[in-house]
Image (cartoon, rainbow, N blue to C red):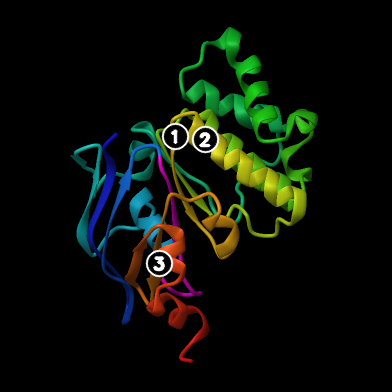
């Protein structure tokens, strides 16, 4: 196992707002890395920069030893880097199955195998019974599952999940966590941005904590959550 991605001294500004200030991190192959922090800490901005949806103002992104800082998102996806969005973006007017078939075809699955392959993916994320429902008719949790299925269909090496657990409770939450752990078992590296600290900590190998655009802690979940700076960032002094 080695390092699959390095973000080096990342800076991102929006006018006078310093959204990211010198953030560096390394993502190891086949780990689940959690990125947490209070609202406005820069979590989604970091994912947007890593995935190419925002350009860095300063810094570098190195993926599998290659500088991809200036590559557009679709070229990063071809290299195996894919991501979900906080607000799911399904192709609403076609079926759930058709959404996945498109991904499997992009990934190069042979025509005669795409439907069977898509069915396996839908079962993996718990959408098997909704395969022939229009994607626009799914509820929010189902749409988040479809987001997961769509990235799995692209046969990725690195998946970035942006608040995929939001709104999930009880069995739905447990099931989504199991699906994410299943990605790791299948050899996929996972980066997950979340507000549900306890849930994400339960499945992550490491946590990175951002606050006001800076990295303030990194390491094993238990150590990070006991860090004084992290506690202060979440609940304030005292």
For the N terminus, the quadrant is: top left
SS for dot 3 = strand
Mark 3 burial class by Cα count in 10 Å: few <14, some 14-19, many 20+: many
Disc assigned to residue 42: none
SS for dot 1 = loop
Query: Which residue is label 3 attached to?
Result: 209
6 up-or-down from 15: above or below:
above
Of pointers 2 and 3, the one earlier in the residue sequence: 2
Query: Which residue is label 2 attached to?
Result: 183
Query: What whole-number distance in Å separates the C-alpha atoms at marks 1 and 2?
Result: 5 Å
Where residue 64 appears, as percent x and y from the top left, is 25, 37
Is 32 inside the magenta-drawn segment? yes
Magenta highlight range: 31-42
SS for dot 2 = helix
Mark 2 burial class by Cα count in 10 Å: few <14, some 14-19, many 20+: many
Residue 195: image quadrant is bottom right
- Can residue 216 be seen at all in this image of the molecule? yes
For the point 42% across and 75% down, the residue is 230
Disc assigned to residue 188: 1
> Does the residue at mark 1 contact the one at mark 2 (Cβ under 8 Å)?
yes
Mark 1 burial class by Cα count in 10 Å: few <14, some 14-19, many 20+: many
């Amino acid at each position: 196992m080695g390092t699959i991605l390095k973000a080096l001294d990342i800076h991102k500004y929006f006018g006078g707002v310093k959204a990211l200030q010198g953030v560096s991190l390394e993502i190891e192959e086949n780990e689940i890395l959690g990125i947490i922090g209070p609202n406005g800490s820069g979590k989604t901005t970091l994912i947007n920069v890593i995935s190419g949806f925002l350009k860095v103002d300063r810094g570098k992104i190195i993926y599998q030893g290659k500088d991809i800082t200036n590559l557009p998102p679709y070229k990063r996806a071809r290299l195996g880097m894919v991501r979900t969005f906080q607000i799911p973006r399904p192709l609403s007017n076609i079926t759930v199955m058709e959404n996945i078939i498109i991904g499997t075809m992009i990934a190069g699955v042979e025509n005669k195998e795409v439907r069977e392959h898509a069915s396996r993916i839908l079962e993996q994320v718990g959408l098997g019974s909704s395969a022939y429902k229009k994607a626009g008719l799914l509820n929010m949790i189902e749409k988040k599952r479809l987001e997961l299925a769509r990235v799995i269909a692209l046969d990725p090496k690195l998946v970035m999940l942006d608040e995929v657990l939001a709104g999930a409770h009880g069995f739905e939450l447990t099931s989504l966590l199991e699906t994410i752990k299943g990605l790791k078992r299948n050899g996929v590296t996972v980066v997950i941005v979340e507000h549900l600290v306890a849930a994400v900590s339960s499945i992550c190998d490491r946590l990175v904590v951002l606050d006001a655009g800076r990295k303030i802690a990194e390491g094993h979940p238990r150590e990070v959550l006991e860090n004084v700076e992290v506690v202060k960032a979440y609940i304030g002094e005292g």
